[in-house]
Amino acid sequence: MNKFKRRDFIKLMGISTASVATPSILKAATGSNVAPRVVVVGSGFAGSTVAKYLRLWSGNMIDVTVVDPKSSHVSCVMSNLVVNGKLNMSDITFDHSLLSDKYGVKFIKSTVIEIYSGLGGKTVSLADGSTLTCDFVVLAPGIAFDNVTGWDQNIAPHAWIAGPQTELLRDQLIDIKAGETFVMTVPKAPYRCPPGPYERACVVADIMKRKGGGKVVVLDMNSKIIVEEHMFSTAFSGIYGDIVEYIPNVEVDSVNGLTINTSKGSFSADVLNVIPTHKAGKIISQLGYATVAGRWADVDPISYELRNEAGVFVIGDSSGTNQPKSGHMANSQAKVCADSIIRMIANQPIDDLERLSNLTTNSACYSPITYETATWLTAGFFYDQNEKKMKAVKASLGQAEKHSVDHYKDMFSWSQNLFENTFM
Ligand SMILES: Cc1cc2nc3c(=O)[nH]c(=O)nc-3n(C[C@H](O)[C@H](O)[C@H](O)COP(=O)(O)OP(=O)(O)OC[C@H]3O[C@@H](n4cnc5c(N)ncnc54)[C@H](O)[C@@H]3O)c2cc1C
């Protein structure tokens, strides 16, 4: 534990692969005045990062258009601090103008519904009936949820895609009274932010404790707490021992208003937080790309290009690698992808020994445990050239030994760093 010092991964931000294709090489390689075009689907952690670095590392030689139905991105990272009233929505909201003004990234407010590959490149169809043509498509659509019979997210919010759902859960928790019951589900792994649901349980238990007591029932679809087990089980049985009831191996049958029916019985709540099992963003299944366990996109991690569709890349939570689904990881994968696309345009190899030997990604998650303390978890990954996949660097697997005020302060430096590196 704690082998990797927390300040080390704060410094790691921005390092993965750095492009070697200089703007002059790019110009010579393309040999024309028409800029190569990339369409990015989604403006979250993965999409915004790839758009920014495609512009930055190519010396603005690549035309980059991002499509997203939202005009600003609300970050899930730090959103549990909106849920407990520490932050405002404006603290976790990033307007697209930050990337368009500084880097010339173009944004279109719409939803991508189809992609066609032809001899002349790719055609991307939007919900408003218009089309975009380009040379490469990067899909970064985040997640979608499995259906849960009877579930109404306006009554029992997930608050797992940040935005109005976060505000709804926050408002319900403002109204919850001492002695009342909060019930939540933990989705089956893999899901976004491995410690996130256990962090949510602690944040709500802290709210109940400060209100004078109550109950937090955690219905875990996994057989045990999947990360930071010691940290969270100690919190559940220690500081929150009179509040949290943790139940593993739960299968969810249905939801009826504020009652959830499961393999371990029915639970009625005053506030119900249903976080269903995840799959890749809807467009990935629509296009037939969800081939890893029928849920995630099958990509080659040296570029994040789909294994069965040249010129189409999938990064962030939608990709099906053995790396954690996190904003920090999405940022890291996006840089590997941007570097690959620039090299492809410059007719440079992406699989030379030097590049593959230096191919790394990393992830970090901070979790508030109380109103003033937090914990953290990190992992670094390298490309194993024999197994042709990303593997965890054992020495980089680290987690805090205990939650503390210092870690809580570091959480703000780390998240600010990630936000600036991604959205600004
Ligand atoms: C409570 C909570 C806490 C978290 N804490 C951490 C943490 O401490 N550290 C960490 O690293 N990560 C954390 N995460 C995880 C992190 O938020 C996600 O892993 C990250 O958002 C994934 O980025 P993404 O770009 O893949 O998806 P997203 O950020 O969700 O972005 C997807 C975007 O795609 C758009 N989109 C979808 N479909 C289409 C379409 N067809 N056309 C156009 N646009 C489309 C969506 O509108 C959205 O803007 C946390 C998550 C939660 C819920």
Image (tube, rainbow, N blue to C red):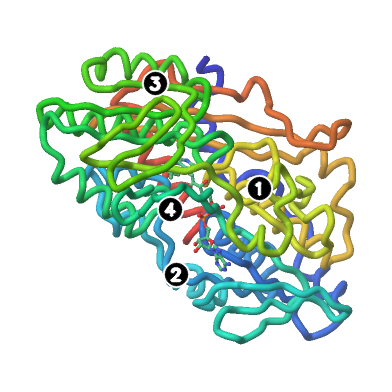
State the residue at coordinates (89%, 46%).
352
Between the residue at mark 2 and the residue at mark 3, the CA separation in whole angstroms equals 34 Å
Of the numbered discs 4 and 2, the one sitting upstream in the chain is 2
Q: Give amino acid for label 2.
A: Lys
How many numbered badges does the structure rendering display? 4
Visible in this render: residue 135?
A: yes
Q: Give amino acid for label 1.
A: Arg
Asked if the residue at label 2 sits under 8 Å from ligand 1, the reply is yes
Disc 4 crowd, CA 10 A, few/some/many (<14, 14-19, 20+): some
State the residue at coordinates (60%, 72%).
112
State the residue at coordinates (58%, 63%).
52
Q: Which mark is residue 8?
A: none
Image quadrant where residue 245 sits: top left
Element at label 3: helix
- Judging by the rendered image, the residue that carries numbered circle 4 is 161
Q: Give amino acid for label 3.
A: Phe
Q: Which mark is residue 232?
A: 3
Between the residue at mark 4 and the residue at mark 2, the CA separation in whole angstroms equals 12 Å
Element at label 2: loop
Visible in this render: residue 373?
A: no
Image quadrant where residue 54 sits: bottom right
Looking at the rendered image, the disc whose residue lies closer to the viewer, 3 or 1, is 1
From this view, report whether residue 234 is shown above or below residue 363: above
Q: Give amino acid for label 4.
A: Ile
Q: Position of residue 307 (x, y in %)?
A: 83, 52
Element at label 1: loop
- Judging by the rendered image, the residue that carries numbered circle 1 is 295
Asked if the residue at label 3 sits under 8 Å from ligand 1, the reply is no
Disc 3 crowd, CA 10 A, few/some/many (<14, 14-19, 20+): many
Element at label 4: loop
Of the numbered discs 3 and 1, the one sitting upstream in the chain is 3
